[in-house]
Image (cartoon, rainbow, N blue to C red):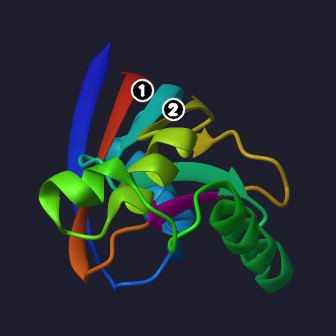
Amino acid sequence: MEIKNYVLSFPTTAKTDLIDITREVSQRIRESGIAEGSVLVFVPGSTAALTTIEYESGVVEDLREAIERLAPEGVRYRHDARWGDGNGYSHVRAALLGPSLAIPVIEGRPVLGTWQQVILCDFDNRPRKRQVVIQVTGNR
């Protein structure tokens, strides 16, 4: 069994950024040479998350609006009162979705549905340079 690690960086804005990173994940699986196993995708930090959706403009906007309804930006958060940074909503949003995904790898490719993409979600209220850790584990 082999393990290959990669760290990617993605610039984000001060909005709810939803970034399709499927191509980058698939490329690292190919680079690893691992044919059978799994890929773990993880975003360090407490104001970003990962999910899968069909990365189509309508669904992307639907997800953005649903997230706003679940953890709206303009309401009071105790985190903001304590730290004064105004990103309490970002922490709640990230916690709801979670920081990682585990995806099976079969024949050197991630097992994703036809319309399923891997999405990096950055909720912070300032531009960031998000790191994403990709760990491919398995056999050649």
Is any atom of residue 108 visible in this view? Answer: yes
Residue 93: mark: none
Instruction: Determine the residue located farthest toward the left in the rendered image.
Output: 83
C-alpha span from label 2 to label 1? 5 Å
User: Is residue 54 inside the magenta stretch?
Assistant: no
Q: Nearer the viewer, residue 107 or 120?
A: 120
Picture quadrant where residue 104 is located = top right
Which residue is found at the position 29% from the left and 70% from the top? Answer: 86
Disc 1 target residue? 140
Bounds of the magenta span? 118-122
Q: Earlier in the sequence, mark 2 or mark 1?
A: 2
Q: Is residue 21 left or right of residue 122?
A: right
Q: Nearer the viewer, residue 134 or 1?
A: 134
Q: Nearer the viewer, residue 59 or 137?
A: 59
Instruction: Determine the residue located farthest toward the top in the rendered image.
Output: 1
Q: Secondary structure at mark 2?
A: loop
**Number of other residues with Cα within 10 Å of mark 1, as a class: few under 14, some 14 to 19, many 20 or more:** few
| Mark 1 residue type | Arg
**Do the residues bearing badges 2 and 1 touch, measured as CB atoms within 8 Å?**
yes
Which residue is found at the position 22% from the left and 76% from the top? Answer: 128
Residue 41 at what x, y percent from top left?
A: 41, 42
Circle count = 2
Q: Is residue 86 left or right of residue 121?
A: left
